Image (cartoon, rainbow, N blue to C red):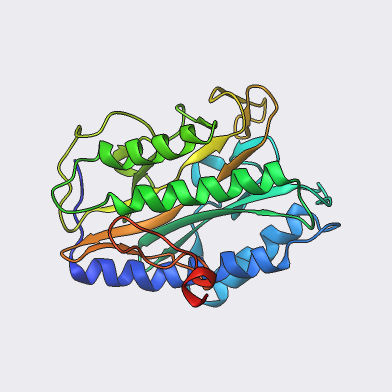
């Protein structure tokens, strides 16, 4: 059953989303070569709790940390430990906050220092795929329109779209109905209507879309060892269209229906 959200509930999720987005932005600014993933996790928990939130991930089905930190070929669910970031790594940080019983969930991938052109292109296209998916979150569209837009953009650039992991509804639980695949044909699934809140999260790979889970039962890696990138936003559908509840400073602007442009382009 899909739990639709009232305006009051969406406002609470927006407040929580500010905590989540602000904390993620701080982590993205802070991450640098030589820093351990565990240090980032500690900073995340301190930030979330200092603002009245609770780290959603910590203890979720036994997950031991407040954030997921996924480096290079790790797609998602990397456990932050003693690995020290290196120049040229790409790092995905996935983070969730529970605030007044409601969850917000977001993720982004960044380069550590100077990264290869191939890595930079993968990250850019993955973020674009997310924004194009969000643009399809319109009243009267179908759920599959989101994944179709993501898949079309990623595959047009030669990338793989992970099938084994999907986005999801979000609200009083981190994972609610419906599931939101990042692939598929347009015009299928439920009709989208105001009150729907989704965590849309393309996971895009340089090579195969196939993935493997490591023996820790959390860490998911690409099947061929090539790079992966992950971007995510919590989005509410309103009468006016999609509203990103986890938008960060210097992130893409909220969408004008079907277009996205970075802020630096808008200022040019």
Q: What is the x, y in percent for residue 23?
A: 57, 68
- Tell me where residue 152 appears, x and y as whole percent: 40, 35
Q: Pinpoint residue 45: horizontal percent, then vertical percent.
A: 61, 64
Number of numbered labels in the structure image: 0
Q: Is residue 178 above or below residue 96?
A: above
**Which sits in the foreground, 86 or 81?**
86
Residue furthest to the right in view is 34
Could you tell me which quadrant the N terminus lies in? top left
Q: Residue at x 40, y 60 (%)?
A: 260
**In the drawing, does residue 41 fall left or right of residue 101?**
right
Q: Residue at x 68, y 35 (%)?
A: 73
Image coordinates of residue 228 in percent, x first then y, are 62, 38
Residue closest to the far front: 268
Q: Residue at x 20, y 45 (%)?
A: 2
Q: Quadrant of residue 13?
A: bottom left
Viewer-proximal residue among 5 and 42: 5
Choose between 42 and 144: the one closer to the eye.
144
135 horizontally vs 230: left or right: left
Residue 216 higher or lower than 58, as above or below: above
Residue 53 is at least partly visible in this image:
no
Q: Is residue 53 above or below residue 216?
A: below
Relative to 39, 143 lies left or right = left
- Residue 252 visible in this rendered orientation of the protein: yes
User: In the rendered view, does 89 fall on the left or right side of 26?
Assistant: right
Q: Residue at x 53, y 25 (%)?
A: 209
């Amino acid at each position: 059953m899909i739990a639709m959200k009232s305006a009051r509930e969406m406002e609470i999720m927006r407040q929580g989303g500010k905590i989540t987005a602000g904390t993620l932005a701080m982590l993205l600014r802070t991450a640098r070569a030589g820093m351990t993933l565990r240090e980032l996790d500690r900073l995340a928990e301190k930030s979330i709790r200092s603002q009245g939130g609770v780290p959603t991930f910590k203890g979720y089905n036994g997950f031991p940390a407040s954030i997921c930190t996924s480096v290079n070929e790790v797609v998602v669910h990397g456990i932050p430990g003693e690995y020290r970031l290196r120049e040229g790594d790409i790092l995905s940080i996935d983070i969730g906050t529970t605030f007044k019983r409601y969850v917000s969930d977001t993720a982004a991938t960044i380069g550590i220092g100077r990264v290869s052109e191939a890595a930079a292109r993968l990250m850019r296209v993955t973020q674009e795929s997310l924004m194009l998916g969000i643009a399809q979150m319109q009243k009267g569209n179908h759920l599959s329109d989101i994944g179709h837009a993501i898949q079309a953009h990623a595959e047009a650039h030669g990338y793989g779209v992970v099938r084994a992991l999907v986005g999801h509804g979000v609200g009083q639980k981190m994972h609610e109905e419906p599931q939101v695949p990042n692939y598929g044909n347009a015009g299928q699934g439920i009709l989208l209507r105001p009150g729907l809140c989704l965590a849309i999260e393309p996971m895009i790979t340089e090579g195969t879309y196939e993935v493997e889970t490591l023996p820790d039962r959390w860490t998911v890696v690409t099947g061929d060892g090539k790079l992966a990138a992950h971007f995510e936003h919590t989005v509410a559908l309103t009468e006016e269209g999609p509203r990103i509840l986890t938008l960060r400073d210097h992130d893409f602007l909220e969408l004008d229906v079907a277009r996205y442009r970075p802020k630096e382009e808008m200022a040019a």
